[in-house]
Structures are given as structure tokens and as C-alpha cells.
Image: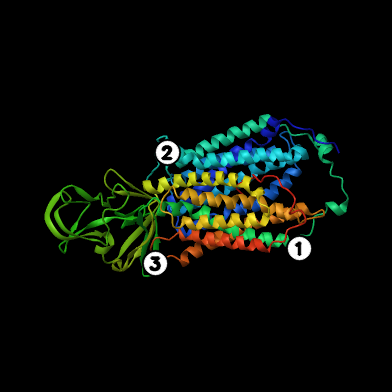
């Protein structure tokens, strides 16, 4: 077998340059998925379930692409066809995902669209990511692999930082950072568009610059695969696990608590920062109507096909009670010029907060104007919803879209009709959520991207420090402890700049998580099954995230009060406790014979 030739720096650069674009896509997904689903109306208790998809797709797609590309040879090469397919799908889906709330779907349909788009995006990103890892193995000799992976790591980190800060940079350049309820702001949408364009450019550059070896040359440098049957047959997974060294299991336990924690970070960071550091207002969102056990859910609900009573999650006004007497109203103005109700909707202030509610009594109003008629001074006034003044049999229609025609009639799309026997027993079903359409929430969403960039930079800096510790286990444990403290601080910090400290500490944990587990494990492995064990060890990254995604909603429900704002910031404390437990579990690791050998500076910082 021939020795692979040395490659120039720029040829090594070209092998990995596409990783820059792929990582921008991954960073945009990681920083904005929870924000997108919250904006289009997802329940906070359901957010973690959407995060099952990224680790699940990674668990399924990366091994499949690896095995399939081993057997692929065509005019485009061996690995590049999978880059072309993955990147093409990723570019298309990146243009669709942030628009999930812009297609006039119902909330449930918009969420379903978002889920499908997220699944396709994560699948395609994983498909596009794998070829760059394998190209280094195919074409770079052992002497240069350290440099090749360092270049890949640099591009990976650079792509992450760029992707994270896109929304906040677009906001600094003057792009609008708010949008109507249920619609994702332009800063996020255009960040995905620009990210898709950069990914496309990087892929085209890679296709032009990378020339894969044809099969006969590849076999000369990598062997023709003619090995004896004993070594080529697939190892028995159960036997491998039964014979796995203790290090495999003890490091795996640490991995479980670490990746469990980070899944909660990606899921709940945006809402935590929005509530704690940006004072995002909470609003009551109507999710439907309940009567005698029958539930009618929908973004728009129409009474008797004539009167819209719920519009985009807001219960509309039917009138006001003035000193005990009822007056129908589509407009209410108090104290001369302060409009409370306009077009049957309660008006919001500049912070996006409703000026009035159906449960609040307004007293001593100096002047009240209803539908343009002055009612004079009023001692007590209540805004009244439609259901409170209806009795008898009614029909309610849950519609995806309601359009008012020129003659005043309503046109319904995708409507479902329900019959209510006794309207007096009907009640609105509501939940309290952060106002995802408010300026504060969207400023917080952009800020979270900046915080992730701070974490990535802190991770690189701490990775340079890690090899200077005499004890690898001590540095591993200390890093996780610092990260746990950073998570817990997120639950308490109310200053957006103090959050830099929390994310720098979290970056310390991230650096150790990517540097030490595989290093410690490989030092304990011998024989011909190292690749198989490393493949199995990837499960300690994906499975904890899947478990955390399934458990997140349940844990949040345990600490929530029904109907009240979900305290998502406490999930950061749960994550902190989890990773601190992982820090303690490091003490149980038994390192292999190479644990005192010097190691290269661990600078890999890939989002897995």
C-alpha cells in the first residue's frame, strides 16, 4: 500500500472548507429552533419534544451515509454525491423552516410543517457533514491528519460563531426584529436565507476544488480491502458490549449527564433569557372553547358563521358593562384619548401587553366613549367577551383562515363546525405564555445567538488550557463543574451582560466534553474493534439527548402551575445539577495505559 502524499495547506483547507457553510446551518438551527416553534404557537411544555429529531437523525443518518459512501463510486466521486444531495435539501429547507408561521396555517398545522422541515433539515445537515470528515480519512496521510482536523475545527468554530450572530447583526444593521403574532421576524428568516446562500457557495467551491481519487488510486493508498474473513465480518454488538472495558461504561455515564444537560440548554435558553434578562411580557392566549367536556380548539373560532369570537388566539370583545348595564361595543375609549378596544380587539401598549382584560374591573373612569358615544363618568366598567352574553343552542366553527368580505360576511377556510347545546356552560380555554411577538422576546432571541457565540469562543480558549493540567480527570471534572455553575447562574441572572459569564463557564464544559471522552476511551481500547467501539460510543451522545427531549416536558409540567407561565428558567438549574452529577461521576473513570502521555491541544468544537 502506497503512502499518501503530503498535501499543501490550501488543499487541506479545500477538503474542509464546506464545513464552514454546513456549520452555519447547524448553528442557525441550534440557536433558533425553540424560538421559531414558540413564535408559531407551540406550548412551552412541548418544546423539548421537537428536539428529539436532531440526535435521532444523527444516530440514524451518519452511520448510513458512512457505510453507503464506502460503496459509492460515480462521476462525482465517492463522498461528494452525499454532500450534493444533503446540501441541496438543506438549502431548500432553510428557506422554508423559518416561514412556518407565514403560510396562514392553523397553529397545529404550522407546528407540523415545522416538525417535518426540522426533520428534513437535520437529516440533510448530517448527510452534508459526514463527507468532510471522511474525505480527510481518505486523502490525508497520518502525518498531516492533525493539521487537517485542526483546519476543520477552525472552520467549524468559525461557522458556528457566524451562524449564531447573524440575527443580532441584521438587527444592528436596521432590519426589523418583530413580526405579527405567529410569524417569525425578518432577522431570523433572512439569517436562514443568507446561511443557505453561504452553504450553497461553500458546496459549489468544494465541488470545484476537491478531486476525489478514482477507485484504483484510492485502493493504492488505502488498501484494496482484501482482508481475511475473520477480520471483515461484522462484530457482534452484544458481545462487544459484554467485553467492553470499564472505561467505556464509566465515561458513558458521564456523557449521559452532560448531553442531557445541553439538550435542555438548546431547548429552554431563549425563553429563559427572554423572561429573566429582557422582561418579556406574558400574555393570555386562548387555545379553544370547552363545553360539557367537548373541546373546540383553533386559532379562529366563529359564532353561528356570522361573528368572529376568537382571532389568532385572542378572545374578542362583545361589549362593556357600565355600572351594571351592558352595551355592545367594537370600540371603547376612556379618559378622552386612551383606546382600550378597537375593532372588537383589546388594544396592546407599546410593550405588546394588553391594556385591559376580561377579568379586570376598571374604576373611576372620568369619561368613557363607546362606539363614538360618550357615556360620561363611569364608576365601574368591565370588558365583556361574547360567550358571557350568549345562551341557548349555538354553532361554533373552528377555521384556519377567516376573511371579511366587502359586504361584511365572513369567508371561512378549513372550517370544522360544532354544535353547542347550552352556551351558558361554555368557557374559554387559555394558557399564559411569553409574548413571542413582543420586541423584548425577539431582542432576547437575537441575544441568545450572541451568547452561543460567546460559548463557542470560550470553549476554544479553554481547550488551549486543558492540556496544561497534570491530571486529565481533574480537568474534565473541573470543566463540568464550571459548566454546571454556568447553567445554574442562568436561572438567576437578570442582566443580559452577566450572562456572558454563564456562557463562558458553559463553554468550559463544552470544551472538555468534546476533548476528553474519546481520548480517554481510545487509550483503554486494544485489538481490532476500536472503530466498532467508537461507533457504539456515539450512542452516549445521541441517546441522552433523546431521553432529555422526552423527559423535558414532563419535568417542566411537574414544576408548572396549570394555566400560569411555565417557569422554563428552572430547567437551567435542572441542567446544571445534571452536569454537576456528571462531574462527580468522572471520579469513577478508570483510565487506560496512555493516560499520562502528552496529548495534542483539543480544539474540536463541533455541534453534534
**Mark closer to the observer (2, 1):** 2
List the residue tagged with mark 2: 171
**Label 3, residues with CA under 10 Å away: few <14, some 14-19, many ≥20:** few
Q: What's the CA distance linking mark 2 and mark 1? A: 53 Å
Counting residues from the N terminus, which is met first, the one under dot 2 or under dot 3?
Answer: 2
**Mark closer to the observer (3, 1):** 1
Q: Is residue 472 left or right of residue 163?
A: right
Mark 1, secondary structure of its residue:
helix
Counting residues from the N terminus, which is met first, the one under dot 3 or under dot 1?
Answer: 1
Q: Is residue 302 visible?
A: yes
Mark 3, secondary structure of its residue:
strand
List the residue tagged with mark 3: 294
Q: What's the CA distance linking mark 2 and mark 3? A: 45 Å
Q: Residue drawn at (72%, 55%), measured in percent from left and top?
A: 521
- Residue 122 is marked as none
List the residue tagged with mark 1: 238
**Label 1, residues with CA under 10 Å away: few <14, some 14-19, many ≥20:** few
Image location (x, y in percent) of residue 99: 46, 43
Eyeballing the image, is 32 above or below 170? below
Taking depth in this image into account, of 438 and 269 the one nearest to the observer is 269
Eyeballing the image, is 57 above or below 249? above
Amino acid at each position: 500500500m502506497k503512502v499518501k502524499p503530503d498535501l499543501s495547506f490550501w488543499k487541506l483547507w479545500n477538503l474542509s472548507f464546506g464545513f464552514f457553510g454546513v456549520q452555519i446551518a447547524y448553528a442557525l438551527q441550534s440557536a433558533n429552533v425553540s424560538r421559531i416553534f414558540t413564535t408559531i404557537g407551540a406550548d412551552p411544555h412541548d418544546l423539548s419534544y421537537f428536539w428529539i429529531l436532531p440526535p435521532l437523525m444523527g444516530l440514524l443518518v451518519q452511520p448510513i451515509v458512512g457505510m453507503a459512501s464506502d460503496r459509492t463510486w460515480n462521476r462525482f466521486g465517492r463522498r461528494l454525491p452525499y454532500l450534493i444531495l444533503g446540501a441541496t435539501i438543506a438549502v431548500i429547507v432553510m428557506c422554508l423552516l423559518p416561514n412556518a408561521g407565514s403560510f396562514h396555517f392553523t397553529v397545529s398545522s404550522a407546528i407540523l410543517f415545522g416538525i417535518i422541515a426540522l426533520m428534513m433539515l437535520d437529516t440533510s445537515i448530517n448527510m452534508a457533514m459526514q463527507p468532510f470528515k471522511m474525505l480527510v480519512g481518505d486523502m490525508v496521510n497520518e502525518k498531516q491528519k492533525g493539521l487537517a482536523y485542526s483546519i476543520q475545527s477552525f472552520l467549524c468554530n468559525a461557522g458556528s460563531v457566524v451562524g449564531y450572530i447573524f440575527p443580532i447583526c441584521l438587527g444592528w444593521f436596521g432590519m426589523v426584529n418583530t413580526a405579527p403574532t405567529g410569524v417569525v421576524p425578518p432577522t431570523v428568516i433572512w439569517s436562514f436565507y443568507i446561511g443557505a446562500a453561504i452553504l450553497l457557495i461553500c458546496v459549489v467551491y468544494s465541488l470545484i476544488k476537491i478531486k476525489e481519487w478514482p477507485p484504483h488510486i484510492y485502493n493504492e493508498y488505502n488498501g484494496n480491502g482484501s482482508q481475511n474473513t475473520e477480520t471483515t465480518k461484522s462484530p457482534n454488538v452484544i458481545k462487544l458490549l459484554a467485553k467492553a472495558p470499564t472505561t467505556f461504561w464509566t465515561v458513558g455515564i458521564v456523557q449521559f449527564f452532560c448531553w442531557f444537560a445541553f439538550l435542555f440548554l438548546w431547548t429552554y435558553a431563549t425563553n429563559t433569557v427572554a423572561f429573566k434578562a429582557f422582561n418579556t411580557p406574558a400574555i393570555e392566549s386562548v387555545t379553544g372553547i370547552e363545553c360539557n367536556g367537548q373541546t373546540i380548539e383553533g386559532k379562529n373560532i366563529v359564532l353561528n358563521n356570522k361573528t368572529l369570537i376568537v382571532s389568532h388566539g385572542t378572545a374578542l370583545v362583545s361589549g362593556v358593562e357600565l355600572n351594571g348595564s351592558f352595551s355592545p361595543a367594537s370600540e371603547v375609549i376612556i379618559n378622552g384619548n386612551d383606546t382600550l378596544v378597537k375593532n372588537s380587539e383589546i388594544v396592546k401598549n407599546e410593550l405588546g401587553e394588553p391594556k385591559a382584560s376580561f377579568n379586570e374591573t376598571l374604576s373611576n373612569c372620568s369619561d368613557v366613549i363607546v362606539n363614538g358615544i360618550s357615556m360620561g363618568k363611569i364608576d365601574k366598567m368591565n370588558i365583556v367577551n361574547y360567550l358571557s352574553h350568549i345562551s341557548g343552542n349555538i354553532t361554533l366553527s373552528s377555521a384556519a383562515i377567516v376573511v371579511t368580505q366587502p359586504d361584511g360576511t365572513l369567508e371561512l377556510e378549513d372550517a370544522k363546525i360544532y354544535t353547542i347545546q347550552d352556551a351558558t356552560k361554555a368557557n374559554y380555554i387559555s394558557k399564559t405564555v411569553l409574548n413571542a411577538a413582543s420586541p423584548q422576546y425577539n431582542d432576547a432571541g437575537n441575544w441568545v445567538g450572541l451568547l452561543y457565540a460567546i460559548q463557542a469562543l470560550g470553549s476554544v480558549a479553554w481547550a488551549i488550557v486543558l492540556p496544561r493540567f497534570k491530571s486529565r480527570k481533574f480537568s474534565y471534572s473541573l470543566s463540568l463543574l464550571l459548566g454546571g455553575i454556568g447553567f445554574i447562574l442562568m436561572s438567576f441572572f437578570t442582566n443580559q451582560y452577566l450572562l456572558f459569564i454563564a456562557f463562558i463557564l458553559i463553554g468550559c464544559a463544552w470544551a472538555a466534553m468534546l476533548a476528553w471522552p474519546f481520548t480517554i476511551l481510545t487509550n483503554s481500547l486494544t485489538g481490532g474493534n476500536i472503530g466498532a467501539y467508537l461507533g457504539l460510543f456515539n450512542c452516549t451522545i445521541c441517546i441522552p439527548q433523546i431521553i432529555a427531549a422526552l423527559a423535558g416536558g414532563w419535568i417542566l409540567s411537574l414544576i408548572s402551575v396549570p394555566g400560569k407561565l411555565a417557569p422554563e428558567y428552572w430547567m437551567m438549574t435542572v441542567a446544571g445539577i445534571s452536569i454537576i452529577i456528571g462531574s462527580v461521576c468522572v471520579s469513577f473513570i478508570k483510565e487506560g495505559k496512555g493516560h499520562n502521555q502528552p496529548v495534542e491541544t483539543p480544539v474540536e468544537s463541533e455541534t453534534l
